[in-house]
Every structure is written in C-alpha cells, then in structure tokens.
Amino acid sequence: ATMPPLLSAMSTAGRNGVLVKSAVAMEKLADVDQVAFDKTGTLTTGTPSVTGVVPIGEVESVDAMLQIAAAAERGSEHPIGRAIVRAAAGSEESDRLRVEHFRAVPGRGVQALVDGRRVEVITASRSEVAIDAGLVAEVETGGATAVAVIVDDRPRLLIAIHDHLRPGAAASVGALARLDGRAPVLVTGDNAAAARQVGDEVGITDVRSGLLPHEKVSAITQLRERAGARIAVVGDGVNDAPALAAADVGVAMGGIGADLTLETSDVVMVRDDLSAIPAVLRLARRARRIVI
Ligand code: ADP
Ligand code: MG
C-alpha cells in the first residue's frame, strides 16, 4: 500500500534530519509565510570564542577575574557561558573556586556566589552597575557580544565574544527568500551591531536585536498580525522556548542542552543543517497539494 502523502513527507523529512513531530505539524509547515531565526546557536554554530578581555578600572589580575567568571559560568548551558569556561580552561584555578547559588537568567546572563563573592556575568549594556558606554560600544562595533563581569557590584572585566556562522545559514536564508512568502527575519537577544553583522552575512535585512525572551514573543506576535502571516520560529535555547511556543510552527535546533526547546517545538532539526528548512517547507507544500 502507498503511504498517505503527509506521512510519506514526514518520513522523507526524517531521512534528511528533520523530525516533524506530527501530521498536523507537517500541514502547518505547508502554510508558513515567514521564518524568524534566532541568532546565537541557530544561525551561528553555538560554539563562539572569547576574542578579547578588557579590564575595567584597576584590576590586579585579568586572568584571575576570567577564572572567577568561568567559575560562575560552570553550570551554564549557554554558548557564551561555555565559551568563557573554555577560555579559562588550562588553569586549575577556576575548578578550585567554590560556586554556590548559581542562577541563569535567560536572555541576560548568570549570577553566582564564587568563594563568597557576588558575581554576575551579563550583557554589558544591560548591567545595572554603570559601565563605560564608550568601552562597551568599542567592543560591540567589531560585531562582538560584550559581556561584563561584575564582582561585588563593581564592574571588573569586559569579555568580547565572536560567533561563527553555521555552514548552510546563508544558503538557507537565500532559498527561503526565493520561496513565495516573506523574507526571513532575525530575532535575537544580542546587541544591535553583532546582530546586524550576522544579518549582513546571511542576507537578512529585518533584524530585531536586544530582545528578552518575552520580547521575542511580542516580535513574533507582531509579525503574525501583519497581514495574518503564519510564522515559523527557529531557535535553540531556553531563551527561545516562549517564542517557539508562540509561533505557528516552532522549530528547535537539536543540539545538546536543548531539552526545553524540544518540548515546546513542532519540528526538531536533528542534524542542525539549516538548508533542510526550505527543503521541508517545499516538501510540506507539495504533500498538501497531493492531499487536496
Ligand atoms: P540569542 O537570542 O542570540 O540566542 P540569548 O537571548 O540567549 O541570545 O542571549 C542574549 C544575550 O544575553 C547574549 O548576547 C549575552 O549578552 C547575554 N547572555 C545570555 N546568557 C549568558 C551567559 N550565560 N553568560 C553571559 N551572558 C549571557
Ligand atoms: Mg539562541
């Protein structure tokens, strides 16, 4: 017997590393008018590197501060947290530091008590402690994410982090722009300069940056209300879970630590190959034509 077209499309998608969770999800994919991409870990690899460490004020040892930041990030699943931990690796100091009361704040950063000192590692421009804006701008202008290390309410370091594009990101955006529908958009918690740089590299002009998780939801709702467009959101992190849930179709990158996004999604990219996204939209549209 031949398989019904939707099931057949689901199995083809599965062979290409795209797990479509239900026939209903496959049908919804056929109706998608526009795709909104998260940046960090979605259009980019999610393995960024620390490219610079700048002391703020008088800091006795930049390396000791980096070790404290890495200790605070030890429990973080965020690509930025992992990059900071990798940058500090090789010294045993950060492993020796005692970490208590670790807390991750999605879209912002982390807090912890490190050897009894209150440490925050957060988006520099969102810090409640005043930080030299010129210094932050200088770091961000190069397309870096600027993260501040604050110890006992004093800013001590700026860490510059650069991310790398995922192979296939530009091709995927190009193919989506050629499908009928609206050109893809970028929604990110990162700063405007870093967001624009990635937008330029992949060919997205509608770039919305500096968004907290609930603001990503508002951005999606707004896109959707515009002419009743149906929106797919592609994201990877805990910070994207509300946006994935608010989308018409939530697409989760299937990397490590993505458990929460897996639950709130309709589609999982098992192989993290972004070029499979336009392919699955075409597949879904074709399957629906056969159904009707
Ligand atoms: P995106 O939307 O690009 O995936 P997120 O919403 O996860 O980004 O994060 C937004 C910003 O919050 C990051 O660019 C970074 O400045 C800050 N941030 C998030 N998690 C961390 C962390 N663990 N350590 C430091 N900064 C973080
Ligand atoms: Mg992300």
Image: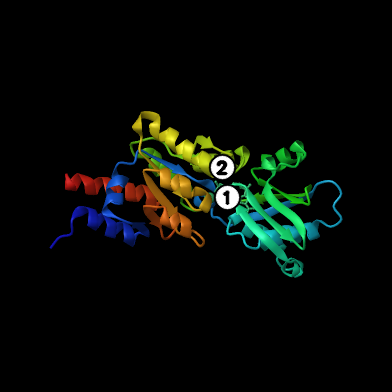
Q: Quadrant of the N terminus?
A: bottom left
Residue type at numbered disc 1: Pro
Q: Determine the residue located farthest toward the left in the rendered image.
A: 1
Residue 87 visible to the viewer: no
Q: Badge 1 is on which residue?
A: 106
Q: Which residue occupies 85% across, 52% down?
A: 59
Mark 2 C-beta closer than 8 Å to ligand 1: yes
Mark 1 C-beta closer than 8 Å to ligand 1: yes
The secondary structure type at the circle numbered 2 is loop
Instruction: Give left or right: position of 90 versus 285.
Output: right
Q: Badge 2 is on which residue?
A: 212
Instruction: Give left or right: position of 175 versus 201.
Output: left
For the residues labelled 2 and 1, say whether their Cβ atoms are less than 8 Å apart: yes
Instruction: Bin the neighbour count of mark 2 within 10 Å (Cα to Cα): few under 14, some 14-19, many 20 and up.
Output: some
Figure check: 70 above or below 35: below
Residue 55 is labelled as none
Instruction: Give left or right: position of 218 versus 94.
Output: left
**Residue 203, percent across and down?**
49, 39
Residue type at numbered disc 2: Leu
Q: How many marks?
A: 2
Q: Quadrant of the C terminus?
A: top left
